[in-house]
Image (cartoon, grey):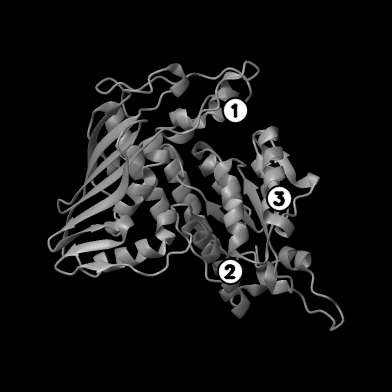
Amino acid sequence: MSDRTTPRKPSEPPSRRTFLKRSAAGLVGGTLAAALGSARMAHAAGDDTIRVGLVGCGGRGNGAAVNAANADPGMRLVALADIFEDQLEHSRAVLSQQLGEKFAVDRDHLFSGFDAYKKLIDSDVDVVLLATPPHFRPAHLAAAVDAGKHVFCEKPVAVDPTGVNSVLATCDRAAEKKLSLVSGLCWRYDEGVRQTMAQIKEGALGDIVAVQENYLTGTLWHRGRNPAWSEMEYQIRNWLYFTWLSGDHIVEQHVHSLDKALWLMDDKPPLRCVGLGGRQVRTGEEWGNIFDHFSVCYEWAGGVKVFAYTRQMSGCAGDVDDYVLGTKGRAQVLKYRIDGEKPWRFRGESPSMYDAEHRELFASIRNGTPINNGRYMSYATMMAIIGREACYTGQTITWEEAMRSMQDLTPPKYEWGDTPVPEVAVPGVTKFA
């Protein structure tokens, strides 16, 4: 909420807090309003500090806080929120060491519990970093935007169509409020990938015929089971392995690859997809209800197909890259390489894409030129969801029916206690709502 300051006497020092709380009504139609909109522009009051709050204090959240600190000299981390108090304290200890003077979180700005995000958003922050398990993203994003905060929003943005549609509506509100909303789909901020994509879009490959997206990798962490934990706590602490929390690894991880395919298709969604997948290796109850491999074929208008493969298994061949086949050549996007009639390599520097996301976010706030990554981050997430559902059900899933779907994976209630253990999908039996 960037607001107009009232005239002051020459001797009166500028007050950042006063500036942020003024009504914006008098700015409508003015030059400052045009530049700032409803954005919170702390530095315009004479104090160039941008106050940042982190929601979700796991590894990715801590990493996002460090990237934000690297990105802007005037950034200060002033609030932390997490469901778990022990996670909160761990993050406080780690980040206070890593951020130095940019860590400015006092005890009154440590929030825990299911409603911790609300308390953080209601505190005096300008930017919110959202890095909780993906299930919570739609509600957290809506609360941040409705409160007039700029947002860094980790991927994916939802785990079901209901969540995606909520996020799309929230992103529209962010645009109306002239708030910046930057996505954690980090390859969009990698300089080498940007230059490679630009070459492809300028015709270096001719017409795109097909794309192969590989995210073939090993397994990730597991926190184990503590007898003191309720079933709800166990699932949230091991959120990767429950579809209602992570969306499954095709949504949580492979979304990066699918986003690049969407980018190649000018951010236009596919018509339909069909796929197969299952649990071959991770079959025990500790692995929740997710699959360990997916293979999906997406089809666009005009007949272009994307063949997407993802696997989380130890001891198997790995490959993470994007292979683009065109009428005049082929490209490996993550190798920054094009072969064919117009061979090309990117030889320049490619600074950290994780820092770049935040540099561009803070620059947009300071310059009054909002960024809104909302549509593509929502569409990439929905691509991953329809791929998952095609594999879970064994059916062809169309984009249209997914956008109309009422599927909502939210549990009956949020509280520490018993909660249903989700069933593993069975293709040919499981239905898409």
- The residue lying at 54 percent from left, 65 percent from top is 359
Question: What element does badge 3 sit on?
Answer: helix
Left or right: 385 in relation to 364? left
Residue bearing the label numbered 3:
97
Question: In which quarter of the view is residue 36 placed?
Answer: bottom right
Q: CA distance from mark 1 to mark 3?
A: 33 Å
Helix, strand or loop status at disc 1: loop
Task: Tell me, for residue 37, which label it has, or none.
Answer: 2
**Relative image position of residue 366 (x, y in whole percent):** 60, 70
Marks 2 and 3, how far apart at CA: 36 Å
Relative height, residue 9 to residue 414 (above, below): below
Q: Please tell me which of labels 2 and 3 falls first in the chain.
A: 2
Q: How packed is label 2: few (under 14 Cα within 10 Å), some, or many (20 or more)?
A: many
CB within 8 Å, label 2 to label 3:
no
Q: Report the number of numbered marks.
A: 3
Judging from the image, what secondary structure is the residue with disc 2 in? loop
What residue sits right under mark 1 in the picture? 414
Closer to the N terminus: mark 1 or mark 3?
Answer: 3
The amino acid at mark 2 is Gly
x and y, in percent, of residue 239 in the image: 51, 31
Residue 408 x/y as whole percent: 44, 32
- With 270 as the anchor, is 248 left or right in this view? right
Residue type for callout 1 = Tyr
Residue 168: in sight, yes or no?
Answer: yes
Gap between marks 2 and 1 measured at Cα: 36 Å
Q: Position of residue 227 (x, y in %)?
A: 62, 15
**For the N terminus, which image quadrant?**
bottom right
